[in-house]
Image: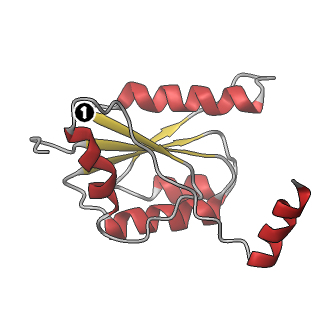
Amino acid sequence: MTTAGPAVSIVIVNYRTPDLTRLCLRLIRKHTDPARARVIVVDNASGDASTDYLRSLDWITLIERTPEPGEPVAINHGRAVDLALAQVDTPFALLIHTDTFVRHAGWLDLLMAPMDNPKVGGVGSWKLDLRPAWQRSFKRAER
C-alpha cells in the first residue's frame, strides 16, 4: 500500500485516563512510523492531568471537546469519535481505546495488509487478556 502521505489516522478518545493515555501514546510513537500514521486524540473534557499532557505533544492532533450538559457518557464517546472522524484525511481510520498497547513495530502492517484485498471492508485487533489464569478460570466456572 503506497500513498503520498500517511495511510491511516489513529483515533483515540481520552476521558480521565492520564496514565493509560500516556502509555498508549508512547507505545504508538515508539512502534509506528510517523510517515504512515497520523494520530488524532479527542479529550472529552477530562479536567485532569491528561489534558495538559496531550497539549504538550506536538506530534498529535488534539481536539478538546466539551460535552453538552446532561449528555450521557455513551453519547459523549460517540460524539468524540464523530469529531475525530471529521478530521480524518487519510484513506483509513483506526479507532482504538486508551488501554490499547502496541507491542511491536510490525503492528500497523499486520492491520493494513488485508486492506489490499478489495473484498475486505475493515479489520480489527484482538483483545489480549492479561488477567492471571486463576481469574480467567472463575469466568469459565460461571458458565
For the residue labelled by badge 1, is the local secondary structure a helix, a strand or a loop? loop
Q: Is residue 49 above or below residue 6?
A: below
User: Where residue 121 sits: x, y (%)?
Assistant: 34, 30
User: Where residue 22 sits: x, y (%)?
Assistant: 54, 64
- Residue 40 appears in which quarter of the rendering? top left
Residue occupying the point 34% across, 61% down = 107
For residue 19, side relative to residue 120 (left or right): right
Q: Is residue 104 above or below residue 66?
A: below
Pointer 1 local density, CA inside 10 Å: few below 14, some 14–19, many at least 20: few
Residue occupying the point 66% across, 47% down = 15
User: Where residue 26 sits: x, y (%)?
Assistant: 44, 68
> Quadrant location of the N terminus?
top left
Q: Where does label 1 land, which residue?
A: 91
Q: Is residue 46 above or below residue 93?
A: below
Q: Is residue 52 above or below residue 66?
A: below
Single out the residue that lies furthest toward the right.
Answer: 142
